Image (cartoon, grey):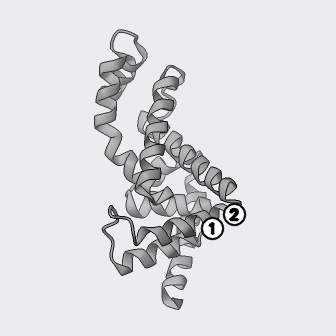
Amino acid sequence: MNNEIQLVKELQSQQHKEKAFRELISLYKERLYWHIRNIVKSHEDTDDVLQNTFIKIYKNINNFKGDSKLFSWMYRIATNESITLLNKNAKRLQITSEEVQQLAINNLTSDVYFEGDAIQLKLQKAIATLPEKQQLVFNMKYFENLKYKEISDILETSEGALKASYHIAVKKIEVYLTDN
């Protein structure tokens, strides 16, 4: 994608960095928002993580070598920032990151930005029972419709391992939805 190469050049040049960064935000803000939201659940936390993600992208754009797509690199940062927030919340509340997820899901019902119905809430609860890696793979594949190749670039894992993780996640979710 030629536009991406041009955008990266502009982001890495002092002369065009500000304008290119505004363009980058308008291009990716919504996709990154929903990616983060799928992980951290709450709107407020998502906004914080999104802001931190863009700050990291801005500060580290000169380290981007183009080995992967810009999109994959940004998603990796957003994913890591999301996990960092979950771990920080867990430490602050002195509970596990799984319990933080459970709290976030319980708070979804009172979240004015959550438009889901009972079925979607049940699905979120099922997803929260999965190990972190399976949650990430499931969210990226199911909600964001990413290809295994893209997920592989973001999580730096083989496509085969991702397919297995997704398959296991789907089975566990089916069991949870049947039993609850």
Residue 23 in view (yes/no): yes
Q: Position of residue 79 (x, y in %)?
A: 53, 47
Q: Position of residue 88 (x, y in %)?
A: 64, 50
Q: Position of residue 105 (x, y in %)?
A: 49, 69
Q: What residue is at 37 percent from the left and 80 percent from the top?
A: 119
Residue 42, above or below 1: below
Which secondary structure, mark 2? Answer: loop
In the rendered structure, the answer to whether residue 67 lies left or right of residue 22 reads right
Count of residue discs: 2
In the rendered structure, the answer to whether residue 56 lies left or right of residue 87 reads left
Please identify the residue farthest to the top as the structure is shown.
15
Q: What residue is at 33 percent from the left and 34 percent from the top?
A: 25
Of 99 and 56, nearer the camera is: 99
Q: What residue is at 56 percent from the left and 48 percent from the top?
A: 155
- Figure quadrant of residue 94: bottom right
Which secondary structure, mark 1? Answer: helix
Of 141 and 26, nearer the camera is: 26
Q: Label 2: which residue?
A: 95
- Figure quadrant of residue 10: top left
Q: Amino acid at mark 2?
A: Ile
Q: What residue is at 49 percent from the left and 43 percent from the top?
A: 78
User: Dot 1, how many residues are within 10 Å of its Cα: few (below 14), some (14-19), or many (20+)?
Assistant: some
Q: In what quadrant of the picture does the N terminus appear?
A: top left
User: Dot 2, how many residues are within 10 Å of its Cα: few (below 14), some (14-19), or many (20+)?
Assistant: few
Q: Amino acid at mark 1?
A: Glu
Whether label 2 touches label 1, CB < 8 Å: yes
Residue 159, above or below 48: below
Measure how far apart labels 2 and 1 are at the Cα level: 6 Å
Of 52 and 171, nearer the camera is: 52
Q: Position of residue 7 (x, y in %)?
A: 34, 24
Residue 118, above or below 93: below
Q: Label 1: which residue?
A: 99
